Amino acid sequence: MPPLPSSLEIAQAAQLRPIADIARELGLGDDEWEPYGRTKAKISLSVLDRLRDRPDGKLVCVTAITPTKAGEGKTTTSVSLTQGLGAIGRKPVLCLREASLGPVFGVKGGAAGGGYAQVVPMEDLNLHFTGDIHAITAANNLLAAMIEASLLHGNELGIDPSTVTWRRCMDMNDRSLRQVVLGLGGKVNGIPRESGFDITAASEVMAIVAVARDLQDLRRRLGAITIGATYAGLPVTAEQLRGAGSMTVLLKEAIKPNLVQTLEGQPAILHCGPFANIAHGNNSLVADRVSLKLGEVVITEGGFASDLGMEKFLNIVCRNGNLRPSAIVLVATARALEHHGLEPGGGPAAIERGAANLARHIGIVNSFGLKAVVGVNRFPGDSDEEVELVKSLALKHGAHAAELNEGFERGGEGAAALAEAVMSACEEKSSFHFTYESADPIEEKIRKIATTVYGADGVAFLPAAQAKLKAFAEAGYGEFPICMAKTHMSLSDDPAKLCAPTGFTVTVRDIRAYTGAGWLVAFCGDMQAMPGLGKEPAAVHIDIDESGRTVGLF
């Protein structure tokens, strides 16, 4: 059997359908989409007004067990499941996040799937796409510049520079920018103080675009951003700085979801790109809402694992958007279970030990009153014995169903059985509920996530976090949901604790208030909002060949 071409080679050889055909088959009117070249389009939010009375389709979230550094193929599963649903005669719509340049040039690589289960055009999706992330970066940094201008030119709002929490951002991994000193070089260059950069995916502007319901809601949320406080201790907002209007203008195209296609021609809507270990880790709410009106079944993805992106999708996005998921797909692989069994390549015995991690994630799904369909993503070299063992262990530990996924090598045909199992789960009743109530105290919400979802014994709040708990409750943020910033390499806040750790305490060192997005971000362990490149990042392998084609992108 000839070797499988690389994912980039497969994508470059694909014959894409005109985006006009994808838009019209999806049910969009000619005035409801705008082409961005031949293979991409922006969707007007006016479609939501036209279809407001149409019942929503089924909503399925794809997530995973605790991943390894190489990833377990969650996006590949999302794409192949969508293609599989098409193969069995359903009308699916795929919703995914946009790729951040940081991971593309870092370790993770692209965000378009892989093999014969991809969203295309792959190069565009993984690089600049339609410019949404650049617009978010610009809006974020415009506000930062307006803060500096206000401080320099009279400080009419009486902003205390030492309280300014608004940070700049950029869409690249650069650890040297985590902590910087601003304003050096004399008075004309501003007031010297410490600050820093976050990656754009972790910025509050990204969070706001991802959760805004329409352009006016976007404008309102941007105005509600808190950038610091006055000398009298009163909060200062972007509205008071008169920056929200200009920020909205920069984002008026970025709030429109982007339409592309899978390799097999199913519609895919890509929009926003928050990380799941730092931010809320899901595509935009407007993308979900549009897709639910246009599709029979919507496949969305919660970043990293069920304790991260899925938990935030259910507790934050579904709460905010009044969404009700029908089923959860939990991606598992033999190699990941071997990793959690502390013996990579160890075969069935290691898989048996590592299955404790799979069991915990099935339990997390069930804790929300939802059914878990385990998709066993097959990697080259996995034996029939190993993948069948993972399926049987999934059923043993309470999965609703477990099916093999061979979409990477076979496209939609290789995920047809998984698609059938997902549709079966969607037809059954669920008892979906949240982990915590909005009225719960902030500390109690964090404790419930840590104990119910992560399996922790409790939570320890460091002094800075304790002060924030009190201040945010007094400021009226007590009903905000919680976005946990936590390592994705473990169910705990310690990446070294593999499999299904017990007897641990989650440490919250700081809490940020995203008053525009409408939630609180709790930083656990040593989690950073600006990643760094490794010793040999993916960037060193990406290049242009003699004919001008990209090589090395994955």
Image (spheres, rainbow, N blue to C red):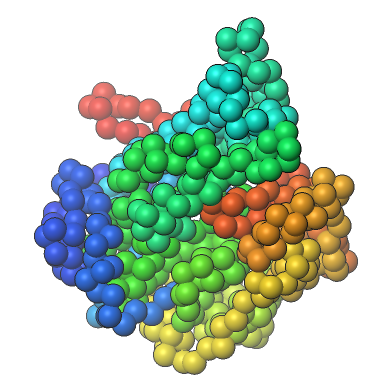
Q: Is residue 297 visible?
A: yes
- Which residue shows up at 25% across the image and 52% down it? 42
Where is residue 456? Give x, y as percent.
Answer: 81, 67
- Which residue shows up at 25% across the image and 27% down it? 548
Q: Is residue 295 visible?
A: no
Hey, which quadrant is residue 406 in on the image?
bottom left
* The N terminus - image quarter: bottom left
- Can you say whether 540 is above or below 115 in the image? above
- Residue lying furthest top: 186
Hey, which quadrant is residue 421 in on the image?
bottom left
- Can you say whether 238 is above or below 441 in the image? above
Where is residue 30? Give x, y as percent.
Answer: 11, 60
Q: Give the camera-side residue of 98 and 436.
A: 436
* The C terminus - image quarter: top left
- Which residue shows up at 76% across the image and 44% down it? 526
Where is residue 64? Give x, y as percent.
Answer: 57, 66
Where is residue 319? Give x, y as percent.
Answer: 54, 71
- Can you say whether 183 is above or below 253 in the image? above
Q: Give the camera-side residue of 211 and 507.
A: 211
- Which residue shows up at 68% across the image and 59% down it? 476
Q: Give the camera-side residue of 143 and 536.
A: 143
Hey, which quadrant is residue 333 in on the image?
bottom right
- Can you say whether 228 is above or below 482 in the image? above
All told, the count of numbered labels is 0
